[in-house]
Image (spheres, rainbow, N blue to C red):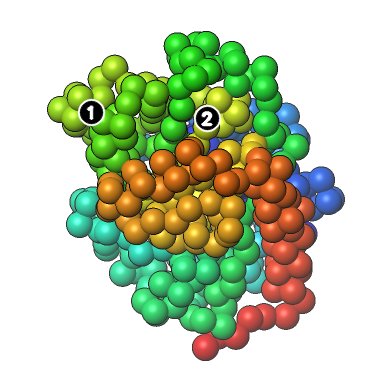
Amino acid sequence: MKILFLLRSLNYGGAERQLVLLAKGLRDRGHNVVVALCYAGGPLEKELQEAGVRIRPLHKRGRWDVPAFLFRLTQVVREERPEILHSYLTDQNLMAVLLKPLFPSIRIVWGVRCSMMDLNRYDWLPGLSLKLTCRLARFADAIIANSHVGREHHVALGYPAQKTVVISNGIDTKRFRHDPKARDRIRAEWGVSEHEKLVGLVGRLDPMKDHSTFLNAAALLVREGKRFRFVCVGDGPIEYRSSLQDLARTLGLEKYIIWVSARTDVSDIYSALDLLVSSSSFGEGFSNVIGEAMACGVPCVVTNVGDSAWVVGNQGEVVPPKNPVALRSAILQVLNRKTYDPAQIRQRVVDQLSLNSLVTNTEQMLSTLLRGSMSNE
């Protein structure tokens, strides 16, 4: 198969990391894989290039660079002549389906990476994009959702059920595994002693991740004693970061919390944690962070959003979203009772969320699509 992926960029992010893993895996199996990027220059590009996956920059100049951008995208598609154009995320899905009249023989595959979004937390454009995709989804040849909740939500919005399948994310368990030396190094770097319990939230600074609930739970925990430390790892808009840091100061967390930008040694960061929290309040489909932390043997407390509860299974705690009191209680339960075995936590990921399953399931689905067609209903 010749597959052209279309993605916004290869900056740090869950969808971006999954695309890198999938593109490399498909190439290793002999498929011709090319990745087209609206905005080039992201840090994850190097990994693809080293694996021999070609990257085609599309040089998008901003939100409103649409006609010229579509012309450049059309040129790239003509030059590459893929059998499948596989887009990731809402805006790129729209761009891909707009090309269908020009390239009727190319199969258009959409990638859906979220569940129910709280569009009131963003400007008007995401809402418009979602409405357009709901109207145009029937023109896609296939739609891959990375979570069961995400599929159900989008089908309810009007996506064709017969064309929409679930392929869960894959976790690279060779990369993500516990490293005692990395644990010592990272904790020393951050000034965290071994007797302190380090609780982390890893993810971009975005309203959907609901850092404020995490911070409010942290404030409740520090009242239990001074043995807790907290870390937020991820990047985001400067204004939003500042607002979260102001909240942390207001809650009296200044001495207890560490703010760290996104970095490549995330596996080492997981090894440094005693517990990982995913406090997302909406929009989450499949959280890579949860699976990656579990592969490192780290227990997780997650909110019941997207497929997070399914990912942890019986190897973690699940609480309602936007509930700092419940989050605080679950964190204490995990840290005080030590009911979870790191080896069993990792084994769930090995058994259920392997990288091989991601690549195999995607390969089989795309091959089936090329041999025939999915229902148009």
Marks 2/1: CA distance? 20 Å
**Residue nearer the viewer, 354 or 102:** 354
Counting from the top left corner in percent of width and height, residue 164 is at 55, 74
| Kind of residue sitting beneath label 1 | Ala
Counting from the top left corner in percent of width and height, residue 182 is at 63, 19
| Kind of residue sitting beneath label 2 | Leu
Residue at the (28%, 47%) spot, across then down: 324
**Residue nearer the viewer, 247 or 111:** 247
Instruction: Reply above or below: 268 against 322.
Output: above
Residue at the (49%, 81%) spot, across then down: 160
Residue position for label 2 = 273
Dividing the picture into quadrants, the one containing residue 225 is: top left
Residue at the (48%, 53%) spot, across then down: 317
Residue at the (46%, 75%) spot, across then down: 152
Counting from the top left corner in percent of width and height, residue 28 is at 82, 45
Q: Secondary structure at mark 2?
A: loop
Residue position for label 1 = 248
Counting from the top left corner in percent of width and height, residue 311 is at 57, 57
Residue reaching furthest to the right: 30
Dividing the picture into quadrants, the one containing residue 240 is: top left
Residue reaching furthest to the bottom: 377
